[in-house]
Each structure stands twice: as C-alpha cells, then as structure tokens.
Image (cartoon, grey):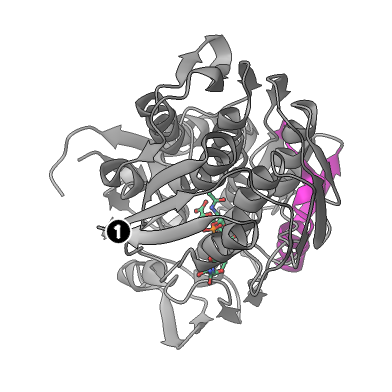
Amino acid sequence: MDKLHISGGIRLSGEVRASGAKNASLPILAAGLLADTPLTIGNVPHLHDVTTMIELLGRMGVGVTVGEGMHVEVNGGRLTTPIAPYELVKTMRASILVLGPLLARHGEALVSLPGGCAIGERPVNLHITGLEAMGAEIGVESGYIHAKAGRLKGARIVLDTVTVTGTENLMMAATLAEGRTVIENAAREPEVVDLAGCLNAMGAAVSGAGTDTIVIDGRERLGGCEYDVLPDRIETGTFLVAGAITGGRVRVRSTRPDHLDAVLAKLREAGATVETGPDWASVDMHGKRPVAVDIRTAPYPGFPTDMQAQFAALDSVADGVATIVETIFENRFMHMLELRRLGAELRIEGHTAVIQGVPRLSGAPVMATDLRASASLVLAGLVAEGVTDVQRIYHIDRGYECIEAKLRQLGASIRRIPGART
Ligand code: EPU
C-alpha cells in the first residue's frame, strides 16, 4: 500500500486550483441513470470514488465514456441490470445514490445494504422510508435492498434527520414520479443544489434546493444535458488550513468562497487574514501560530463535519484550548488518537474533544482511518518537526485529487512512496 512521506516544518506559500466536488460528482453521475439520452458532466475530479461510481454504472450496462479534462458521458439509455453489487457498495457507501434513480427509471433495484463504516453507523432508513412513501415496496434479502415500484407517486416526506445523500436520492426519484413531491427538513448543502441544477437542466422541475423544503414536480422523462460540477469546498478548505497551520499564505482559485462561510469565519478567528474574490479564497497567517478555535459541526450552512478533522490538526498546534463537538457522526474522532502519536495533547469525552494546543508536533508514522482523517494527518505532518509517514492513504485517494502534487506546488516536502508495506 502506498504511503505519504512528509518532511514537516515548511511554511506553505502559493496558489492551487480546486478540483470539482466529489460529493456533487457522485450524485450527478447517478443522475445519469434517470435520462434516456447521454448526460455529459464536466469538472469531474479524478478520484477513486468517482472511478467506483463509473464502474458501478458500467456494471448496470450503462455506457460511460471518460473524455479529455475529466468530462464523463453517462448514457443511461442503455441500462440493463439494476444491481449495485456488494463488492462495490462495500468500498463506497455513496453507491446507495443509485437506488432512487434505478427505482424511478427501471421500476426495480437491487442495491447491497452498506455495511459498517469507520465514522459511524450511517443507516439508510430515511432513504428507504422516503421511497416507500412514494409507493415503493422495499425489503431486505440476503444483504440486499430489493425495491420495486410501478411509477412512483409524489408524496410529502418529512425527514427525521437532515441527510445529504438521503435528500439527493429522494429528489432524484421524485423527478420521474407522478405528481408533486415535497421534501421537508431537506439538506441544504451546495452539492444538493448542484444536483438540482443538473436535474433541471435534464428537464426536471425541482425548486427550493438550498432551503429546507424542496418541491419536485414529476416528469414523464428526462434527457441528457451538459453540466459542470461545482468546485470542492472541502478540498478548498483543506488547502486553506494547510496554509494556516504552517503559518503560510495560500490562495485557492477556481472555487466558491460563498460555500465556505463557516470555515472562513473559523480561519479568521484563528488569526488568519482571509480574503476572497468571486472564485478564489486566500489565507495569510503572517508566520504566526494559530489561535485555538472551538468547533461544533452542523448541517450546512453550519460548520461541516468534513472539515472537523482538519481543524483538529490546526487546534493541535494552536495557542490555547479548543473544544471540538462532532454532532453528525458518532465515531469521527479516529484521527485524534493518531494526532496524539505526533504529540498532540487532547482528551475525548463522548462526542467532544478538548485539545490543548502545543507549540510543536514531532513527526511519526501514523495510520489513516478514513478520508478526512487522512487529510488531518497530512496537515499535522506538514507542521510537525521531522518526518511523518501517513500510511493507508488509499483513503485520501478516494477524495483528494493529486493531493501531494498540489501540496508540492505550495512548497511542501511530500512524496508518495508506492507499494510500501504498512
Ligand atoms: N442518517 C440516518 N438515516 C439515514 C441517513 C442518515 O440516521 O437514512 C444519519 C447519519 O447516520 C448521520 C446523519 O444522518 O448521523 C447525517 O448523515 P448524511 O446522510 O447526511 O450523510 P451522507 O449523506 O451519508 C454525506 C457526504 C459525507 C458527509 C455527510 C455529512 C456524500 C457522498 N457524502 O454523507 O461526506 O460527511 O454527508 O455532511 O455526499 C466525505 O466526503 O468524507 C464524507 C463522509
């Protein structure tokens, strides 16, 4: 397994370009199943999770062509086999995003039930009850969700908990249902809005995306279109923290700073000078040590759980004591224990971590446990004295495009050691 070898202590400086958003690309690729003509998607990042989704669509008989500059064409017209097999779903939970489109378009879906997950229980009950409210018959057989329906019927669905992929699945299913569907307590994440934008360009009638009530008027059919995925706000935030944690100055271009309000506010609170333009954001830490910042994760527009681990790294070297409360996932603190191996002083009480910042971390071998945990360890490695080897970085390849090349562009000393044993 590859590992990342980092020599820390270099103040980062320079500019990088944000890639397209993973968490928008995945539902938009799945939306290709709804159309009877090809959907061409631009700005798709080159990531393992994207490759997994493309493979999943291919297994269903859907033609997928990957073109220049990560343009992906999905030809849902050829859908033959509405099955998402265990071997793919177990590597990527977002595979559940094919359930709604398959059911709406094909009348049947057999999707492996996602199993355990490193960051929490992550059930899919709200995806299932929402589809049942639209008339689907759903059972679980031999580890698979087996869903059947004639034409789905519009319904009023009140989600118990704000769920991102749950909202996306139901929104996609509703585009081909008969009549009006109203999703209450819907997720407001920019990725949900991006998916709605793509669905509307395909001929759907979705309104209210970005608020907690989404209204979908079902259509007889959807066709393909050309659509560019929005920039990755979490990747952007991660590079900005890389600048801040090293006392440096980093600018991320081709991004959407308006999707990062909560993150930019915390960077300012940490002492960085933050500037933004229409499609860029920058931090300048002027060589200073960050000030500790408290974090409480929440659904958008609150502070994203996908940035919690990166701020834990920042708080590890900050001046002061920080409290981090994780409210979305029950087990998203695995990085904390690895940060301790680098010298971080922290304690965990349930869903709260209390971090006493230390002036310096020291490099050590550490193990990545999930995608954002890996990012946190890379960030800590960038500021730690000496060498940090981050092992099991297949997690980071799921969600960060060319992370080591982009960090090198900012002056970091980081390289991938291929095939190293962990
Ligand atoms: N939940 C339920 N029942 C459901 C669905 C969710 O109880 O049927 C609970 C979850 O257990 C969790 C909460 O609701 O406690 C929120 O989970 P959500 O469904 O919103 O998460 P998700 O849709 O599975 C997406 C992102 C995650 C991101 C979360 C929260 C994608 C592909 N994944 O997951 O991204 O952390 O929303 O913002 O969009 C990542 O990129 O590293 C990542 C994990």
- Quadrant position of residue 164: bottom right
Q: Name the residue at 68% across, 66% down.
A: 299
Q: Name the residue at 30% across, 69% down.
A: 341
Q: Is residue 255 magenta?
A: yes
SS at circle 1 = strand
Residue 227: give x, y in percent of width and height.
71, 23
Residue 150: give x, y in percent of width and height.
57, 44
Q: Is residue 262 magenta?
A: yes
Range of magenta residues: 253-277
Furthest residue to the bottom? 349
Q: Is residue 22 above or below residue 225?
A: below
Dot 1 crowding, Cα within 10 Å, few <14, some 14–19, many 20+: few
- Quadrant position of residue 415: top left
Q: Is residue 359 above or below residue 234?
A: below
Residue 281: give x, y in percent of width and height.
76, 42
Q: Is residue 145 above or below residue 196?
A: below
Q: Is residue 55 above or below residue 306?
A: above
Residue 400: give x, y in percent of width and height.
48, 39
Q: Quadrant of the N terminus?
A: top left
Relative to 286, is 20 on the left or the right? left
Q: Which residue is mark 1?
A: 141
Q: Which amino acid is tagged 1?
A: Glu
